[in-house]
Image (tube, grey):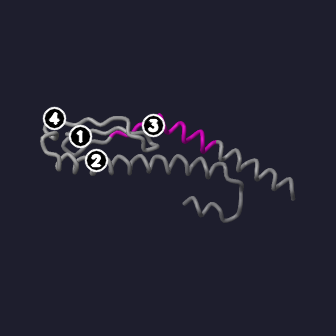
Amino acid sequence: MFGDLMGMMGKLKEARQKVEETKKRLDSVFVDESSSDGRLKITLTANREIKSISVDEQLLSDKEELEDYLVLTLNKAISKASKIQEDELGAVAKEGMPNIPGMDSFFK
């Protein structure tokens, strides 16, 4: 009984380590997003850290328009990055989980 418990704890520790390694790797996965007309370009990591923002000169003359562009484009980029992160971390967590009946339904 304790051997199974110790084995399960070891697998959970290994899964946690793989999740941490995946989080570090996601720092090097870049997500690029542009406004529909290409006047604003944003790059961020899959961990949702902004790396660069490129703004067309025309947007600099209208503060409200620039703010709207930033909100829309950042939200799209963050959504994409979040999806990548969830997929990657979910796969690693599922892979490392011990075989507990019924647990697979949590990852669907």
Residue under pointer 1: 40
Per the rendering, the mark at residue 29 is: 3
Residue under pointer 2: 73
Secondary structure beneath label 3: loop
Cβ atoms at labels 4 and 2 below 8 Å apart: no
Residue under pointer 4: 57
What is the C-alpha distance between the residues marked 4 and 1?
10 Å
The region drawn magenta spans 18-32
What is the C-alpha distance between the residues marked 2 and 1?
8 Å
Badge 2: residue crowd in 10 Å (few <14, some 14–19, many ≥20): many
Is residue 101 toward the left or the right of residue 5 in the image?
A: left
What is the C-alpha distance between the residues marked 4 and 2?
17 Å
Question: Viewer-nearest of labels 2 and 3?
Answer: 2
Indicate which disc, 4 or 2, sits on the residue closer to the N terminus: 4
Which of the 4 image quadrants contains residue 34? top left
Quarter of the figure that contains the C terminus: bottom right
Indicate which disc, 2 or 1, sits on the residue closer to the N terminus: 1
What residue is shown at x 57% (from left), y 58% (from top)? 107
Cβ atoms at labels 2 and 1 below 8 Å apart: yes
Indicate which disc, 3 or 4, sits on the residue closer to the N terminus: 3
